[in-house]
Image (cartoon, rainbow, N blue to C red):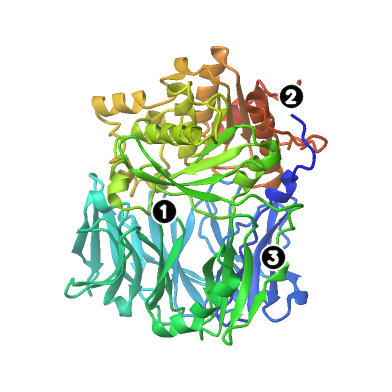
Amino acid sequence: MQCANLIPRSSLFTAEAHPRMSGDGQLLAWARQFRDVTNIIVCPTDDFDAVRPLTFETGSSLTSFLHWSRNHRHLIVFKDTHGDENYTACSLDSATGRLRELSVDPRARTLLVADSPRHPDVVALCMNARDRSCFDLYVVDLVSGDCRLVFENPGFSRLHVDDDLSIRFAEQVREDGSVDVLRADTSGAWMPLFTIPAEDALSTRIDAVGDGGRCLYLIDSRNRDKAALCCLNTSTLECKLLAEDPMADVGRVLYHPVSRSPLACFSTRARPLVHWLDDSARRRFEHNWARIGDETDVEFVDIADELHLALLRTVASDAPPSYVLERWDGQLRRVEPVDAPAPPRPLQKMEIATIRSRDDWPMVSYLTPAFSSRANGRLVLAVHGGPYDRDHWGYAPLHQWLADRGYAVLSVNFRGSTGFGKAYIDAARHEWGGRMQDDLCDAVHWAVTQGIADPTRVGIYGASYGGYAALMAAARDPSVFTCAVDIGGPSSLLSFVEGIPASWSSWFPMVLRHLAPPHTPAGREWLLQRSPLQLASSIKRPVLIAQGLHDTRVAALESTQIYDALSARGVEVTCVTFADEGHFIGKISNRLYLASLIERFLARHLGGCVEFGVGEPQPAAVCVLGAMAPVEAPALSASNADAGATP
């Protein structure tokens, strides 16, 4: 259907800037994507007109993750080749623009562990250069590039260091999914400290090391349902409760940038709540929040070392996020260089609903109504990935895009979603393809009974686990869903589990506990029976599949095998592959092209609007096969098909 005055896709699917502020409060840096390559830009916090580019990459793209070092001059940035997640760490000099690679092996995955005010020119990094399944600890000088191996990892899943960047604690995941936390003694031997039971492993974690290693700040669900912020005395093992929310897990913690003591923490049931832990910080920051707006949430991005300046992210549901600088005297200043283009007309507000599952779990959900003049009972159920993650209230380009095209969009925090207590996570154990799917159907039933959805015009959309759920919906519930969009979802749980990346192997038993063991006959049978590929003969509804060929989380095999099975049976199926992407479709040209395909696919089967006259050119690295392929679609070569099939 052709509609007038549609919001252009290009104004919705742009990359958010994610600015970061140096610890001295002097500089802002952010990532900006131009011609599909991400580069870094910097400016003083008191002069937005003095914007200058720092990098001039034309090939390998930098990621949007930026971290200012404690010397306030160098940024730690990461390169990612075609989305393969083998991140190469780099030191970027904000004064000269010099970009120095820090990783010891460009094929290794490098992650930031910690920095320290005591050692401003160095950072601790972990890399899996020696063994892809183990991340060794290195201390790297940002100025000289010198890289020193300080700990060869025998198989721990996580390492924790103190303010001297000396390794103090480690975590080791057992086969049953529980986690042993160990402490290094003065001789370097590892001694047991405490154990996180398997039922708590996805909701309990070490969040920070404090007081020179004498305190571990824990997000802790042990002996309780909702995770709280606690301080564990590492000598006495006494655990002091610092903050809790009876309705939701404590999630993010805001720490003082120098002392590392917690200033506040946040929990989210439907929208975020702040729990202040420091009275001076409360007095310093709390009074200005009401000035930003009742329909806006506020997130701390960075705080200057002296607490004289804070970078805040403001989130509304009907406008792109914006950023403000808050001075010590309460003055708010909008960060102008990173503003997104203003939408051509007001956007839709996101509504909050609590939907009851058939077995009476309350599911916090978010609904964006269709643009009023185009509403006609069409609904797209958008399923989050993870699945041990969650949907949030706020600006969602996917919601706004589809609402503008005439669809109501519903996102439901089905069982297994995080933030709602460990019982809610455990209710999803062995329920992939089972009651987790029931929850999605119950959400659609709610939308139908509320008069929001026409039961004959419901589509399902998801990426990663959400893609798996979309395929399972097509196989299991064809009377509920008219069509399905799967982006990078596993089609066979057996091949997915057997093909996990080596870098996941040390912690994956925590997830495997919620599935089934592939090494037993019963476990293999369960994994097969909960797989869309095994149920492919039941799929009759149209399916659109998208896949990055460098995906190391969900191999390209997962998409190609379900495409082959459906196309062989004559099911209407389209498979679009990206030879220059991984698990996340990140390049703007690819995102816009995929959006154009999804838009046409949904319009064909649900009847919504299509943005005509703005044809997205097919990028060179994209191949489209099946129902929506161009007349002369390039064949999917064996080399491309195999590119993402092996971790």
Query: Which residue is disc 3 drawn over?
Result: 338
The label shown at residue 211 is: none
Looking at the image, is 514 positioned above or below residue 110? above
Residue 630: which numbered mark, if any? Answer: 2
> What whole-number distance in Å separates the C-alpha atoms at marks 1 and 3?
40 Å
Secondary structure state at the residue bearing disc 1: strand
Tell me the residue at 57%/79% (across/down): 72
For this orientation, the residue located farthest to the left is 236
Residue drawn at x 49%, y 18% as measured from the top left:
539
Mark 1 against mark 2, which lies toward the viewer? 2
Location of residue 486 by image quarter: top right
Residue, disc 1: 130
Tally of numbered discs: 3
- State yes or no: discs 1 and 3 in contact (Cβ < 8 Å): no
- Nearest to viewer (mark 2 / mark 3): 3
The CA distance from mark 1 to mark 2 is 45 Å
286 vs 125: above or below:
below
The amino acid marked with disc number 2 is Pro
Residue 466 position, x and y percent, is: 48, 38
Residue 144 can be seen, yes or no: no
- Disc 3 residue type? Val
Mark 3 lies on a secondary structure that is helix
**Residue 442 appears in which quarter of the rendering?**
top left
